[in-house]
Image (cartoon, rainbow, N blue to C red):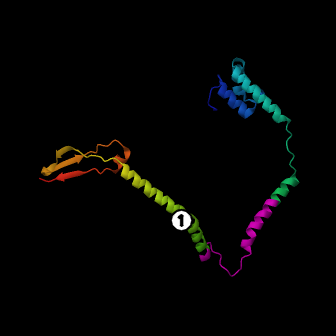
Amino acid sequence: MADREWSTVDVEDIAALTAVYGGNPARWPADRRAAAVRALAMDGAAHELVVNEARLDALLSMVAEPEISAARVDGVVAGALARLDAVTAPAAKAAPGKLDTFLPSPFDLMRTALSWLSVRAPQAGWLAGATAAGILVGVMTMPSATLPATETTTAQAGATVETAQADVTDMPSLLFTSYTVETHAQ
């Protein structure tokens, strides 16, 4: 945007200016301000946009800025550090002779496997059965495709190649029809 010549400004440019700098043209960048003020005088929609943004600025200026004391900031930081110490403290209290590993115990592995089998296995079985039934219904209701021989060519060394093309009108037949190329040596 810095390389742009700001001799003309449209409503989108004024909307961008008001979104960043507010509804007061005195706060707009000097290189854009003159063209934007000219556009405001000529375009009612742009003028309405700036008036609404100025109203929002007035409402925001009535809200008092929060007072944040140094003691309050120190208290928040101390609380956060105390929580970090509470999380890292159990790891520091481990027995000095015991080696810490990240591998789960065999008990944890067995408990996880049994919980998965009791919850997920029936869902997986139903999903597999529904998938198999859908494929079976799709294959049984699929119309058959005919394969008329369309072209016979003679290749090198006296071999004849016949190609067949399916005469299909639907996608399942197109996907599941086998295409054959037969070579007959002479």
Based on the displayed image, in which of its 4 quarters is residue 42 positioned? top right
Of residues 136 and 77, the one nearer the viewer is 136
Front in this rendered view, residue 173 or 94? 173
Q: Which residues are magenta?
A: 79-107
Query: What secondary structure is marked by label 1?
Result: helix
Q: Residues within 10 Å of mark 1 (few under 14, many from 20)?
A: few
- The answer to whether any part of residue 23 appears in the image is no
Where in the figure is residue 68, as x and y percent of width and height?
Answer: 86, 48
For image coordinates 88% across by 50% down, the residue present is 69
Residue 182 placement, left or right of 113: left
Q: How many marks?
A: 1
**Residue found at x 50% / y 58%:** 127
Nearest the eye: 108 or 53: 108
Q: Amino acid at mark 1?
A: Ala
Where's the N terminus, which quadrant? Answer: top right
| 84 falls in the magenta region | yes
**Horizontally, is 147 left or right of 31 in the view?**
left
Judging by the rendered image, the residue that carries numbered circle 1 is 121
Location of residue 131 with respect to 46 vertically, above or below: below
Quarter where residue 105 is shown? bottom right
Residue 181 placement (x, y as % from top left): 23, 51
The answer to whether 82 is drawn above or below residue 175 in the figure is: below
Task: Determine the residue positioned at 62% across, 73% down.
Answer: 108
Give residue 166's position: percent from left, percent from top: 28, 45
Residue that protrudes farthest toward the bottom in the picture? 97
Q: Residue at x 74, y 72 (%)?
A: 90
Residue at the outermost top position:
42
How far across and how far down the image is residue 59, in percent?
Answer: 82, 33
- The reply to whether the magenta stretch includes residue 146 is no
As rendered, which of 60 and 24 lies closer to the eye? 60
**In the rendered image, is residue 175 in sight?**
yes
